Amino acid sequence: MDCNRVFVSKVKRLTIVFTLLIAFLSIKIDTFAQVDSAVVPVDSAVAESAQAVSGEHGEAGHGKEKFEPTKVIMEHIADSHMWHLWGHTSLPLPVILYTPNGLEVFSSGNFHHGEHDYNGKYNNYRLEEDHIKVVAADGKVDEEASKAVLDFSITKNVAAMFVAILVILIVFISVAGAYKKRAGKAPRGLQSFIEPVVLFVRDDIAKPNIGHKYAKFMPYLLTTFFFILFNNLFGLIPIFPGGANVTGNIALTFVMALGTLIIVNINGNKYYWKHIFRPDVPFWLYPIMIPVELIGIISKPFALMVRLFANITAGHIIVLSLISLIFIFETLAIAPVSVAFVLFMDVLELLVAFLQAFIFTLLTALFIGMAVEEHH
Amino acid sequence: MELVTPSIGLVFWTSLAFICLLILLRKFAWKPILGAIHEREQSIDEALNKAELAKQEMARLTSQNQDLMQQARAERDEILKEAKTLKDSILNDAKKQAQVEGAKLIEKAKIEIENQKKAALAEVKDQVSTLSLEIAERVLRTQLDDKTKQEALVANLLKDVELN
């Protein structure tokens, strides 16, 4: 059965991903960069083959007789224009399109789960594999015109991120209020839960890595830490308003890594730049060293980007694969095994959620520390 | 490949949201929280320093107190000693004075007694003479009741005078 074939290959890939995950946990921080660059091809290979498989089965549709775990998993991992609530109920999300003619805003409910086209102001649109395409007059997708339309929709990931941000704001502003109200007193309630984490970021991440200039970078490091942490944790909640794979999306990790890249290079002092453009090597090595150093500027945040993305995505894939076992075998007998493994994975993911937020912040602090370090 | 291709919409919204979050949290959360924690740490440090100082001060005071006590005890002993010598000297003085006074009194009393004795003796002498005169008078009277006796006496007296 091809389902089984898919399953077998899936298990193989999962083994790879899982091994890498464990490797991530056990490898020393300074060797992360190298390991990560090795992970990239593997993970993109996973994604590619997964896409290919889902493409193969794309025509089969939502048939009840056939369960396609890859499609289900990839649907979850990828972004969506709807927020699936339960059964056939989904929350429609606003679609915002930037077309050459102007802005276009409408609800994704108009697509009726991709079954209908929507006649917009400037174009007709169709939802194809959760991508919005422009439909030409002859009823076919116009790829050229589709490329010109930029999709700024509030997708499931964006909405989930907004929810997380709202929660972060509520939590931290109320905690800040508590500090003002109980000035100089011992922390209480939520405050005493947040304070050790804030102190951890300050005393164990910022101070040892950045040194005495740490105070300037505290807001960025704290925001990064809690933004990643809350999004990771929300991703672990299987039902609304969680369940979106926000931190397992390359776009989000790209932005986070870009932030680190910018903050590191803006604050780089003359020693940092000297190290890049005039390293302490014989001058005839410069043609090699300078490009290597320049690549180093990019590769450090690139590693950050891929690490977070791969870790969170891998975790989601494993959990969903384990759940899929029940439907692949079409028996309840496997359910206890699945649930036991999912429970184990969820606990591990809980650890990973903290760990990845920690590692991202730690490495950001480390890079900042390297950029602002004074040499005497 | 789609999985590792960042979509522009998500990049845009994430950047926007993250920058907003950074600005909001920086202003409304991190500044007060870090400020409060810093302030509290400083106040705790200060309190510990103060406690240390207080401890030293306490030790200093205790030793000072001990010194004071010792000093006070020494002073008390001295005062007691002084008082004792003073008492002794006063007692001695008083004794001496009392002796002198007593001697004087005894002297006075002796003189007085002497005087009184003399006066009494003078009075006794007077009285004796008066009494003897009266007795003599009475004797004479009785003796001279009759004429013969008077004549005899005169004769006797005259005889005496003639003798002289």
Image (cartoon, grey):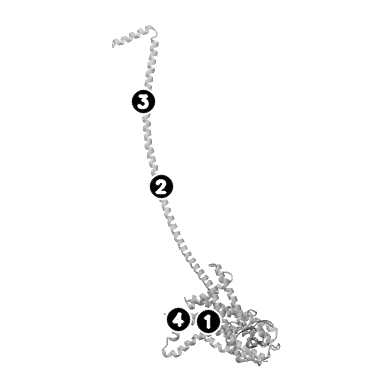
Disc number for residue A269: 4
Instruction: Answer with the quarter of the image where residue B69 lies.
Output: bottom left
**Residue A348, can we see it?**
no
The one nearer the camera, A140 or A241, is: A140
Instruction: Answer with the quarter of the image where residue A319 lies.
Output: bottom right
The one nearer the camera, B143 or A255, is: A255
Mark 1 highlights which residue?
Answer: A259
* Crowd class of label 4 (few under 14; some 14 to 19; many from 20; radius 10 Å): some
The one nearer the camera, A141 or A249, is: A141
Amino acid type, callout 4: Asn
Amino acid type, callout 2: Ala
Mark 2 highlights which residue?
Answer: B83
Q: Earlier along the polypeptide chain: callout 3 or callout 2?
A: 2
C-alpha gap between disc 3 and disc 1: 141 Å
Q: What is the chain letter for disc 4?
A: A
Number of numbered discs present?
A: 4
Left of A376 or right of it: where is A153?
right
x, y percent for residue B55: 47, 63
C-alpha gap between disc 2 and disc 1: 91 Å
Amino acid type, callout 3: Lys
Mark 3 highlights which residue?
Answer: B118
Q: Do the residues marked 3 and 1 share a common chain? A: no
> What residue is at 44 percent from the left and 82 percent from the top?
A271
Q: Is residue A216 above or below residue B47?
A: below
Instruction: Tell me whether circle 2 and circle 1 mark residues in contact (CB < 8 Å).
Output: no
